[in-house]
Image (cartoon, rainbow, N blue to C red):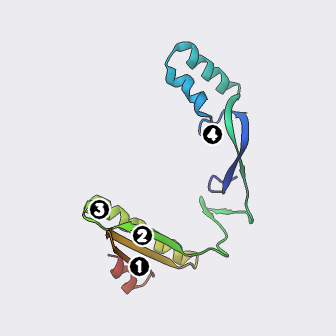
Amino acid sequence: RSPMEPEETAGLSRSDDLSRMLPSEMALIAQGTRPARLLHFARRMERTLLSYERVGWSEEPAVTLDGMEIRPSAECGPIILCLDTSGSMMGARETVAKAMALECMRQAKNQQRACYLYSFSGPGDCQELELKVTGSGVSKLL
């Protein structure tokens, strides 16, 4: 089963999965006392940590090629990006945001989906831009 598969919480179960354990189980480690930590480790080894039970669903199976998961894109809507363009985003943050936008454009093209960018920098300042993998589309972004 893919970790990218949509899931919902369906109840509680016993497991050794730290990512799904209840906060009460984490409290045993947080207490810091040796008996509490030993109890936590014993429960984990026995796979009896109280955990959220996760149930996944998929309408079509995902296909994995060369370590990259390809999901069916039929009936998928556009990719929507919201980007803060205020002064606080200058420098490395701006570079990372642009790289993410470029990757979203690339994925949208691969999946034959539209890609829209909503940039904002303050109250009342919001711009909508349709991102396309063309020379003019990339220059608008950069």
- Which label sits on residue 19? none
Instruction: Pick the residue in front: 39 or 125.
Output: 125
- Which label sits on residue 20? 4
Look at discs 2 and 1 and give the one toward the viewer: 1
Residue under label 2, please give it.
Answer: 101
Residue under label 3, please give it.
Answer: 89
* Image marks 2 and 1: residues in contact by CB distance under 8 Å: no
Q: How crowded is mark 3: few (under 14 residues within 10 Å), some or many (20 or more)?
A: some
Residue appearing at x 66%, y 32% in the figure: 16
Image height check: is 91 above or below 112? above
Quarter residue 101 falls in: bottom left
Q: What residue type is labelled 3?
A: Met
Identify the element where label 3 is drawn: helix
Residue under label 1, please give it.
Answer: 128
Horizontally, is 58 left or right of 35 in the view? right
Query: Which tag, 2 or 1, sits closer to the chain's start?
Result: 2
* Image marks 4 and 2: residues in contact by CB distance under 8 Å: no
Look at discs 3 and 2 and give the one toward the viewer: 3
* Image marks 4 and 1: residues in contact by CB distance under 8 Å: no
Residue appearing at x 66%, y 57% in the figure: 6
Residue 28: percent from left, percent from top: 56, 23
Q: Which amino acid does label 2 sit on?
A: Ala
Identify the element where label 1 is drawn: strand
Query: Which tag, 4 or 1, sits closer to the chain's start?
Result: 4
Identify the element where label 4 is drawn: loop
Residue appearing at x 52%, y 78% in the figure: 109
User: How far, Cα to Cα, is label 4 from label 2?
Assistant: 31 Å
Horizontally, is 43 left or right of 117 in the view? right
Query: Which tag, 1 or 3, sits closer to the chain's start?
Result: 3
Look at discs 4 and 2 and give the one toward the viewer: 4
